Image (cartoon, rainbow, N blue to C red):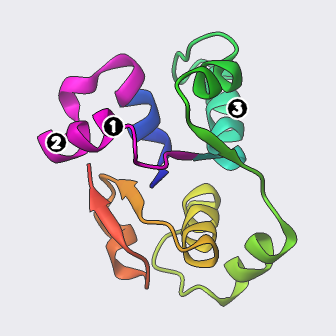
Amino acid sequence: MLLDTHVLLWSLQQPERLSRSVLDIFRDAETRMVVSVAVLWEVAIKTAVGKLKAPPNLPDHVLSLGHEILTVKAPHAWRVQALPMHHHDPFDRLLVAQAQIEDLALVTHDRVLERYDVRIIRA
């Protein structure tokens, strides 16, 4: 499962915002939970400008939860150019590309992402 930015933050700060099925997925120790470096980058930017609050040292916190951190690789970045312009947010477009290439389901609450050829789990 590749976590969208808001899903990661909700899981840490407001788990009640997540659906019961997603909460069950989080509780399943067998489920591979993946957080993209792009998510960490987006949180860092928005934290720096005061748009949101995140736990200090979020990357270490993510790892301590047993989640995997997915680096951004050249094929991920390059795939973005082939995606239809359904969504204009560069972070979300990169997450779609990563989910496609890495064969991961994208856990999100963003309905626009459902227009892409990617498995979506609604948060």
| Residue located 36% across and 28% down the image | 11
Name the mark on residue 26: 1
Circle 1 sits in a helix, a strand or a loop, which is it?
Answer: helix
First in residue order: circle 2 vs circle 1: 2
The residue to which callout 2 is attached is 19
The residue to which callout 3 is attached is 45
Please name which of the two marks, 2 or 1, marks the residue nearer to the observer: 1
Tell me the quarter of the image containing the N terminus: bottom left
Q: Are marks 2 and 1 in contact (CB under 8 Å)?
A: no
Q: Position of residue 10 (x, y in %)?
A: 35, 29
Circle 2 sits in a helix, a strand or a loop, which is it?
Answer: loop
Q: CA distance from mark 1 to mark 3?
A: 26 Å
23 or 47: nearer the viewer: 23
Disc 1: CA contacts within 10 A as few (<14), some (14-19) or many (>=20): some
- Left or right placement of residue 73 versus residue 36 in this view: right
- The span shown in magenta is 11-34
Q: Position of residue 107 (x, y in %)?
A: 37, 54
* Residue 61: quarter of image: top right
| Residue located 63% across and 42% down the image | 68
Residue at the limit of the structure toward the right, as seen here: 74
